[in-house]
Image (cartoon, helix red, strand yellow):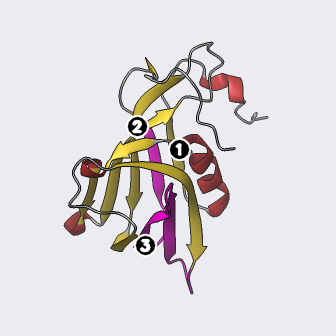
Amino acid sequence: MTEDARFEDGGERPLNLGALDAEDLQVISALAQDAVLPVTEIRWQKAKRRLGLLVNRLRREVGTPDVERVQSLLVIDNVLGVSSQGVDRADKDLVLQILSIDWEAGQDADGHVVLTLAGDGALRAHVEALEVGLRDVTRPYVAPSRKMPDHG
C-alpha cells in the first residue's frame, strides 16, 4: 500500500514540484504566495514555449523560528503567448509580489495560467496544456524583513 506524502516529509530538502491539473496548481500557488521577484527575472523563451520566473519565496513548509526565503524557479511550459497588466517591464527596479496562481480552463486542454500580483498587476500565460513547476535552486536564507507579510 502506498502512502500519501505528509507536510512534514519536506523537512529541509529543497522543493521540486509539478502541477498538471488545477488541484496541483493550488499547492504551488500556496507555496508561491508572497514570493517576490524583480521584473528583470522574468523570461519568456518563445522558441521553447516556456515562461520562467526566478522568485524569492517564503519557506512555509518548515517550522523554523526564523522567517526564511529561498530562490525558486517557477516554470510554466507549453506557453503559446504571454500578456501582462500593471507590469512596467521598462522599470528595471520594479519588484513584483505574487499573490496567487490560478488556472482558467479553455475549450480542450488549453487555458490560461494567471499570476495575480500585488498592486493590481497580473501575468497571463496562454498554454496548450497545464504544466507548471516550482523548484528550489538555492539554500534558504533568513528574510531581510525577518517577518511574515501582513495581509490585513
Q: What's the amino acid at mark 2?
A: Ser
10 Å neighbourhood of mark 3: few (<14), some, or many (≥20)? Answer: many
Q: Label 2 near label 1: C-beta < 8 Å?
A: yes
In this rendering, position of residue 148 left or right of residue 2: left
User: Badge 3 is on which residue?
Assistant: 127
Q: Does any portion of residue 130 appear in the rendered image?
A: no
CA gap, disc 2 and disc 3:
21 Å
CA gap, disc 1 and disc 3:
20 Å
Say which quadrant the N terminus sits in: top right
Q: What's the amino acid at mark 3?
A: Val
User: Badge 2 is on which residue?
Assistant: 72
Q: Is residue 66 above or below residue 123?
A: above
Magenta stretch prevailing secondary structure: strand
Q: Which mark is residue 32?
A: 1
Range shown magenta? 106-135
Quadrant of res 11 = top right
